[in-house]
Image (cartoon, rainbow, N blue to C red):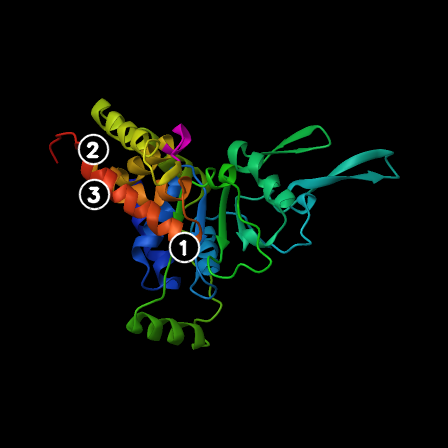
Amino acid sequence: MSENNYYLKKSKAVLREVKKSVIGKDDVICKVYMAIIAGGHVLLDDIPGVGKTTMARSFADALGLEYNRVQFTPDVMPSDITGFSMYNRQSGKFEFKQGAAMCNMLLADEINRTSPKTQSALLQIMEESKVTVDGNIYDLPDPFIVIATQNPIGSIGTQKLPESQMDRFMIRLSMGYPQVEDEVAIMKNRLDPDKAGNASQCVLDKGELQAIKNEVAGIHVDDSVYEYAARIAEKTRSRDNIVQGVSPRGSIALIAMAKAEAFLRGNEYVLPSDIKNIIIETFAHRMVMNVSGAAGIEAAKKELLDILRQVPVPQMSE
């Protein structure tokens, strides 16, 4: 795959467009896009006001996707997400009323501030891209992507996502505070009346996005790389500080993300370095540590870095 590849050029154009709205977070932007073209969902775990919502909206605009945002609060019901059946007196039948999930990109804002019952409504949605209402199954639009946000600091009124739901997110990212020069650019951009409120320009259509996803799926993975990923996952299941290691779903996500990374580099095959570059974002949130909260996240990262030092890297030519 060369730099002249049409879909690689289109992907670079998407990234450039999103960077106009989300300033100074190039690595995060790239990894969100990688998850999208790998067919996964994204959890943005960070404090309010650093651009998580802007990120999601910019990608929806640049990719030409229908976008819905739900502000999760304790009174949000599962039917708000999945939809519900309503009786029509004129027809004498129940009719399906669409929920917020009936879109291409769903921003689940502050997902940990709603009830576990409502959180669980997302499980089938994220795994199968379907909703079940009153025994009837409805397909969601294709593509379907969930970008969820949560604040890792405030705990009052929050409900921690269960491990089964965390496992549905392909990656977990933190945007962090901007650098001083980036924050200056953000302020100028937002307070400029000529720029404020401007949407990102559409760069791809849905057909092109699907073609890119097909290209990513076709990236070659050597057996030695598969084994490398499996050995890393195996190590997470047999360490004293890790209560629960990474499931095979996590290993599949790791390879999918590595394929997306190889695609954006212009390669036709995955290298061990691709695995290393995205393993923290793909594995850390799937691990249950013997400490919780922010300390647990840092402990998971530390364990993964130690595992990477222990597992032999397959020898492949760059």
Residue 311 in the image, given as x and y percentages of width and height: 20, 33
Ranked by sequence position, the earlier of labels 1 and 3 is 3
Badge 3 crowding class, 10 Å Cα cut-off, few under 14, some 14 to 19, many 20 or more, is few
Residue 131 in the image, given as x and y percentages of width and height: 62, 35
Residue 270 in the image, given as x and y percentages of width and height: 23, 33
Q: Which stretch appears magenta?
A: 244-250
Q: Is residue 201 magenta?
A: no
Q: Residue at x 11, y 32 (%)?
A: 317
> 176 or 293, which is in the foreground?
293
* Mark 2 or mark 3, whichever is nearer to me: 2
Q: Which label belongs to residue 3?
A: 3
Quarter of the image for residue 124 reads top right
Q: Which type of secondary structure does the marked residue at label 1 adopt?
A: helix
**Amino acid type for the residue under numbered disc 3:** Glu
Quick one: quadrant of the C terminus? top left
Please, is residue 56 above or below residue 96 in the view? below
Q: Is residue 248 magenta?
A: yes
Q: Which label belongs to residue 311?
A: 2
In the picture as drawn, the residue positioned furthest to the top comes out as 223
**Amino acid type for the residue under numbered disc 1:** Ala
Q: Residue at x 36, y 57 (%)?
A: 17
> 77 or 244, which is in the foreground?
244
Residue at which label 1 appears: 294
Quick one: quadrant of the N terminus? top left
In the picture as drawn, the residue positioned furthest to the front comes out as 240
Mark-to-mark CA distance, 1 and 2: 26 Å
Ranked by sequence position, the earlier of labels 2 and 3 is 3
Q: Which type of secondary structure does the marked residue at label 2 adopt?
A: loop
Residue 288 in the image, given as x and y percentages of width and height: 42, 41
> 92 or 236, which is in the foreground?
236
The answer, for residue 194, to whether it is visible in the render is no
Mark-to-mark CA distance, 2 and 3: 32 Å
